[in-house]
Amino acid sequence: MKKTIDPTYESLAQELHDIYDIQPNSLVVGPLTRAYKKIAPSLKHFPFKVLLPCAVIVSLVGYLILHNLFPNFISLLQYGF
Amino acid sequence: MSPVVSGFVFVNRCFGLIRSPYRTMRNIAGTSSLWEAVWMFGLIGCYFIWSQTIRFGKNFFLINVHSAINLTVWVLVTALLSTIYVSFLSERTDWRSFGRRFVLWVYTLLPTLMWFSVASMLYLLIPPPRTGRFLGDAFGLLFLIFSVTMLLWRGMLFFLAIRFVTKSDFTYSIFVTVIYLAWIVPYSLFLYSLLVFRIPFV
């Protein structure tokens, strides 16, 4: 007799495996863990909507700090490949 | 999995790492083929042939290919050492799944490869040195934004790889990252001293 596989059962079993395969994230301190659990979902799907603004801020800060050395730094970076 | 099918899977997973890196890295940790690593190292080898040709000209093609093979082997050895190192730090080391862990680690090289490829093309199109004028600063800022984005993406994939290799929580993953950096930074300086890489391809 042919054994039928229930696709719903298969997907639920896979979901259960995904949940318990690795430990849940904990940052020891309660507020930090809550902050992490708020930020993490936005990084799971197309994280560039968060990474790009962060990169813009970091780059502007870097530009302001380096200022006169900025062209030399970029030249070094371009030679780095 | 056949090489051709794994090629399609490889391309699909590369786009998946852009769309949803967490889900894609979890899929790679679950099921992957060593052929996917072969595809990645094939791309890396092609990049090195391209970069050596830019630096030394197309008249030295055979020497460029030889150098590219050497550099690709360096990247392969680094990836292997990294996987072994992090696997030893895992709380649940299962050496039977070493191949899958290695493929997972190799996928984290995607942002590195993209940055090096774009930097090499920009070296041709807009060669350095940069000036302090408005256009020079504007290009520099855009390039820096791109570089920082790739670095953050690399960091994210790196953290996910450690999380799925060691199967541990955030705190232990940060601990493993610090221990890993304590090894990879001197190793990168060693490669720099040997004139292998200016910026480490790790």
Image (cartoon, rainbow, N blue to C red):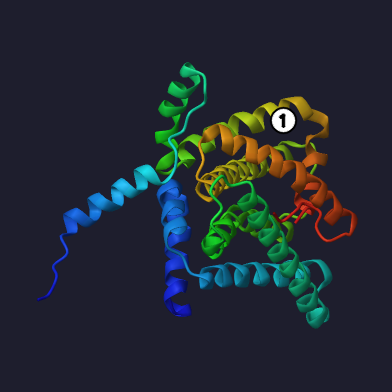
- Residue farthest right in this picture: B193
**What residue is shown at x 42% (from left), y 68% (from top)?**
B9
Quadrant location, the C terminus of chain B = bottom right
User: The numbered mark 1 sits on a residue in which chain?
Assistant: A
Q: Is residue A46 left or right of residue B151?
A: left
- Residue farthest top in this picture: A31
Label 1: which residue?
Answer: A63
Frontmost residue, B109 versus B105: B105
Q: Secondary structure at mark 1?
A: helix
Instruction: Give how far across and how far down residue A21 sits, in percent.
Output: 40, 46
Instruction: Give how far across and how far down residue A17 sits, in percent.
Output: 34, 49
Quadrant location, the N terminus of chain B = bottom left
**What residue is shown at x 69% (from left), y 65% (from top)?**
B76
Q: What type is the residue that disc 1 sits on?
A: Tyr
The image quarter containing residue B181 is: top right
Residue B15 appears in view: no
Examine the rendered structure and indicate whether residue B74 appears above or below residue A34.
below
Residue B197 appears in view: yes
**What residue is shown at x 62% (from left), y 69% (from top)?**
B41
Frontmost residue, B1 versus A1: A1
Question: How many marks do you count on the picture?
Answer: 1
Frontmost residue, A49 versus A66: A49
